[in-house]
Every structure is written in structure tokens, then in C-alpha cells.
């Protein structure tokens, strides 16, 4: 060390602040933190991609299966449901199970099938009476849960069909039921008819709110005293 001319022996202070070793340590910690966050982000991105791929593959498989069931349904019951009878609505029949499985309100074919189903249902019930016994068969008590579930799904499918095609069916909604057999009238008639028997019959757990929403859209009188909603 060369003599600088300063006789003082005081320890010199580095005015630059922290030592270079400490600065290197902080830089290393920051770099490690950034790499850890980057690895976490990559894991999250991979997990999200796997979930999206699973969902996409699942939806494709469901669509393929729906197409198979729809094709089998049309071969069995016809594209206009002309081979549908009273036994098709019973608990042992696959008619409603298949229809409710593949039904898509955006497909005109499915909506037409549902409309023809409603037409057949209304004709059968008007000729034979109780819709609950029609769905439950002879042993209504043991199949009550299945009947309630099918009726809910059937009503929901009809409402989805009307709502999904509301622009096409707008003019039909203002027609009188007694003077028209249009798609909208048949769908709403079936909803009101099924829910009327469900509420006033043995299926007291049917959603009353759905019934009154359907009744509000289409007030149909079949000669029965429909309940009035409490204000």
C-alpha cells in the first residue's frame, strides 16, 4: 500500500453504501424469487391447460354420444314420433331418458321432436286423464322420485325450447290456445298441464315458482281451477 501523505490511522468508510458481497446476495435472492414465481406460473398454466383439454374432450365425447342416442331414438320412434304411445311415458321406458339426454334447444330436429312429444302427451292425457299415473305407471309410490325427476327435466326442456327460440316463436305466443296448435302453444300447454297435475296431485314437491312463471307467459284454462299465486 502506497503512502498517501495522510498521517491519520482512521478506518476509511466506503461511501458507496453496502458491500459488494451484500449487493450480490440481494441480487441472488431477487433472482431466485423471480424464478420461483415463474415456475409457479408455469405450473398454474399447465394445470389450467389440462383442465381445459379434459373439459373439451369431455364435451366432444358427450356430443358424440348424444348423436348416437339421437340416431337410435329416431330409428325407434320415428322423426315425427309417430310410434309413441302411452307406454313410452312410463318409468320402464327409455323414451324420455333418451330424449332428455340428447335434447338441444338450438337443434331444430330436437325441438320438433319435443313438440311432437308434447302433442302426444296432451292427446294421451286428455283421453285417459291423470298425467302422474301416465309417468309413474301402476306403482306410483315406489317410483315417485323418478317421476318427479323426469317431470322436472321435461318441464325444463320445454321452457328451454321456448326461451332458446323466443325470436322465432314470438308471434305464436300471442295466439289463443283453442285456435292454434303451433310449437309455442304446444310446449307451454304441456308445461302448464304437467305442472298443474304435479302441484295438485301427489307430486307436491314440484317447483311452484316454475309453474307460475309458465302460467304467467301463457294463461291456459283446461276447465280446472288453477291455483292463484299468493301476493
Image: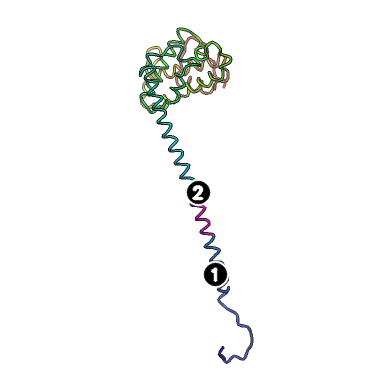
> Which residues fall within the magenta stretch?
33-45
Q: How many marks?
A: 2
Horizontal side, residue 12 vs residue 221: left or right: right
Question: Is residue 173 in view?
Answer: no
Horizontal side, residue 59 vs residue 209: left or right: left
Closer-to-camera residue (5/173): 5
Magenta stretch encompasses residue 114: no
Q: Where residue 178 sits in the image (x, y, percent)?
A: 40, 12
Circle 2 sits on which residue? 44
Q: Where residue 65 sits in the image (x, y, percent)?
A: 42, 29
- Disc 1 is placed on an element classified as helix
Q: How far is mark 2 from mark 1, CA to CA?
A: 30 Å
> Image quarter for residue 157?
top left
- Disc 2 is placed on an element classified as helix
Classified by dominant secondary structure, the portion drawn in magenta counts as helix
Question: Is residue 21 in view?
Answer: yes
> Image quarter for residue 161?
top left
Magenta stretch encompasses residue 44: yes
Q: Earlier in the sequence, mark 2 or mark 1?
A: 1
Sort mark 2 into few (<14), some (14-19) or many (20+) by Cα contacts within 10 Å: few
Q: Where residue 104 sits in the image (x, y, percent)?
A: 41, 27
Closer-to-camera residue (14/101): 101
User: Which label belongs to residue 24?
Assistant: 1
Amino acid at each position: 500500500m502506497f503512502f498517501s501523505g495522510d498521517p491519520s490511522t482512521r478506518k476509511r468508510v466506503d461511501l458507496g453504501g453496502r458491500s459488494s458481497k451484500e449487493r450480490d446476495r440481494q441480487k441472488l435472492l431477487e433472482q431466485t424469487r423471480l424464478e420461483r414465481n415463474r415456475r409457479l406460473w408455469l405450473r398454474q398454466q399447465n394445470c389450467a391447460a389440462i383442465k381445459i383439454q379434459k373439459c373439451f374432450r369431455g364435451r366432444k365425447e358427450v356430443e358424440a354420444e348424444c348423436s348416437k342416442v339421437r340416431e337410435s331414438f329416431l330409428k325407434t320412434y320415428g322423426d315425427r314420433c309417430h310410434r309413441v304411445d302411452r307406454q313410452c311415458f312410463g318409468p320402464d321406458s327409455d323414451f324420455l331418458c333418451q330424449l332428455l339426454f340428447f335434447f338441444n334447444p338450438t337443434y331444430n330436429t330436437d325441438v320438433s321432436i319435443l313438440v311432437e312429444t308434447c302433442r302426444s302427451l296432451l292427446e294421451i292425457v286428455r283421453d285417459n286423464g291423470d298425467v302422474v299415473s301416465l309417468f309413474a305407471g301402476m306403482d306410483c309410490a315406489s317410483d315417485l322420485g323418478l317421476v318427479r325427476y323426469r317431470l322436472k327435466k321435461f318441464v325444463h326442456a320445454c321452457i328451454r325450447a321456448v326461451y332458446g327460440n323466443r325470436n322465432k316463436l314470438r308471434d305464436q305466443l300471442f295466439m289463443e290456445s283453442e285456435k292454434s296448435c303451433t310449437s309455442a302453444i304446444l310446449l307451454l300447454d304441456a308445461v302448464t298441464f304437467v305442472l298443474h297435475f304435479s302441484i295438485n296431485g301427489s307430486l307436491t314437491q314440484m317447483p311452484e315458482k316454475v309453474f307460475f312463471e309458465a302460467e304467467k307467459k301463457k294463461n291456459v284454462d283446461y276447465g280446472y281451477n288453477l291455483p292463484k299465486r299468493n301476493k
